[in-house]
């Protein structure tokens, strides 16, 4: 009985962090939409990862946290970078040139659904319940409602962008599961390491394909890039890796169902976007589905679930 209050306070702190992460990542779609207006996708994401990685490195030095030097850990950072930033962020930035930030938010928030499938197929470290299965079905129905109507009218540029968002969500799912392997490190270490690896991959690609020295980005795009790097990346990554350690991979991706209404609202308020009626129904299905999969069930008896 004596430790129930600290436990309650701890749970409240984790939920507050989850809400903060959802807000930071929910706003990122609007930042990206503004950024790609005058900065090409690969260059935008290369700058995002470099600025955020260097910022986290500076914070690590200030805190006295050392970066690991062994090749095995850096290989893991490189793999995490591909799944958590290089592939999904480039796809999101590319897709954001044609998609509204709200639609991008909804489609990209389906990561817990794919986390469920990957967990079921590969690691099996979290219990499969009927409620999670129901959540998957609702979430998949939501994706079909948002993408389906466009798919019927042919394989257009908008559908390609929507599929890119879903592929980005699958990459996030893999990253959430692999992120469990960093439990022995301070949360800021894998965040900084994976971002620096991401920058090392993206900067040469940006230089070759998009010749950033020829660009003339607007002040709005530059400010959006800075906000994206500092708040929606550096700060968000530290919170993300902390939550993977405390809530588990599916729990950490729970910010997705909070991120959806936040991301849609930011797009509506700041970009004047509107969703179609089928997209609103799809949004409801996705939120219900992801919530069913991620909100912890009341434990009526001890469950032998791997932590």
Image: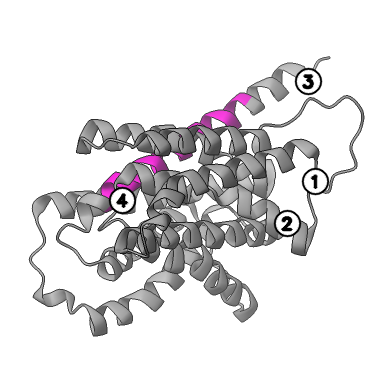
Mark 3 and mark 2 residues within 8 Å of each other at the beta carbon: no
Asked which quadrant contains residue 138, the reply is top right
| Mark 2, residue position | 119
Q: In the rendered view, would you say 255 is above or below 126? A: above
Q: Is residue 169 left or right of residue 229?
A: right
Closest to the camera, between mark 1 and mark 3, is 1
Q: Mark 4 or mark 2, which is nearer the start of the sequence?
A: 2
Residue shown at 85% from the left, 44% from the top: 305
Q: Residues within 10 Å of mark 1 (few under 14, many from 20)?
A: some
Closest to the camera, between mark 4 and mark 1, is 1
Give the image location of residue 43, x and y in percent: 26, 69
Magenta stretch? 12-32
Q: Nearer the viewer, residue 177 or 145?
A: 145
Residue 228, labelled with which disc?
A: 4
Q: Is residue 283 left or right of residue 140?
A: left
Residue 16 covered by magenta stretch? yes
Residue shown at 65% from the left, 27% from the top: 11
Asked which quadrant contains residue 89, the reply is bottom left
**Marks 3 and 2, how far apart at CA:** 33 Å
Main SS category, magenta section: helix
Q: In the rendered view, would you say 269 is above or below 214? A: above
Q: Mark 3 or mark 4, which is nearer the start of the sequence?
A: 3
Q: Is residue 16 left or right of residue 209?
A: right
Q: Mark 1 or mark 2, which is nearer the start of the sequence?
A: 2
| Mark 3, residue position | 3
Mark 2 and mark 1 residues within 8 Å of each other at the beta carbon: yes
Q: Mark 1 or mark 4, which is nearer the start of the sequence?
A: 1
* Element on which disc 1 rests: loop
| Mark 1, residue position | 128
Residue 282 covered by magenta stretch? no
**Marks 4 and 3, how far apart at CA:** 39 Å
């Amino acid at each position: 009985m004596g430790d129930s209050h600290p436990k309650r306070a701890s749970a409240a702190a984790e939920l507050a962090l989850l809400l903060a992460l959802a807000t930071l990542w929910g706003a990122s779609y609007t930042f990206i939409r503004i950024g790609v207006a005058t900065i090409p996708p690969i260059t935008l994401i290369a700058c995002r990862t470099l600025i955020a990685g260097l910022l986290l490195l500076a914070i690590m030095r200030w805190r006295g946290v050392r970066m690991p030097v062994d090749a095995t850990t850096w290989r893991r950072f490189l793999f995490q970078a591909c799944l958590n930033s290089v592939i999904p962020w480039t796809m999101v930035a590319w897709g954001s040139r044609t998609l509204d930030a709200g639609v991008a938010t909804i489609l990209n928030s389906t990561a817990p659904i794919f986390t469920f499938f990957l967990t079921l197929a590969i690691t099996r470290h979290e219990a499969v319940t009927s409620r999670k299965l129901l959540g998957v079905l609702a979430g998949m129905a939501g994706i079909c409602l948002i993408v389906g109507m466009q798919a019927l009218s042919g394989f257009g540029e908008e559908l390609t962008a929507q599929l890119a968002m879903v592929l980005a969500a699958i990459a996030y799912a893999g990253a959430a599961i692999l992120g469990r392997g960093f439990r022995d490190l301070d949360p800021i270490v894998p965040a900084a390491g994976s971002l620096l690896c991401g920058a090392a991959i993206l900067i040469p690609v940006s230089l070759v394909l998009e010749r950033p020295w020829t660009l003339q980005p607007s002040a709005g795009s530059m400010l959006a890039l800075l906000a994206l790097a500092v708040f929606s990346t550096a700060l968000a990554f530290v919170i993300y890796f902390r939550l993977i350690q405390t809530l588990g991979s599916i729990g950490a991706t729970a910010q997705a169902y909070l991120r959806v209404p936040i991301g849609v609202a930011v797009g509506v308020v700041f970009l004047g976007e509107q969703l179609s009626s089928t997209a609103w129904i799809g949004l409801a299905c996705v939120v219900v589905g992801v919530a069913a999969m991620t909100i912890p069930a009341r434990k009526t008896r001890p469950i032998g679930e791997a932590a």
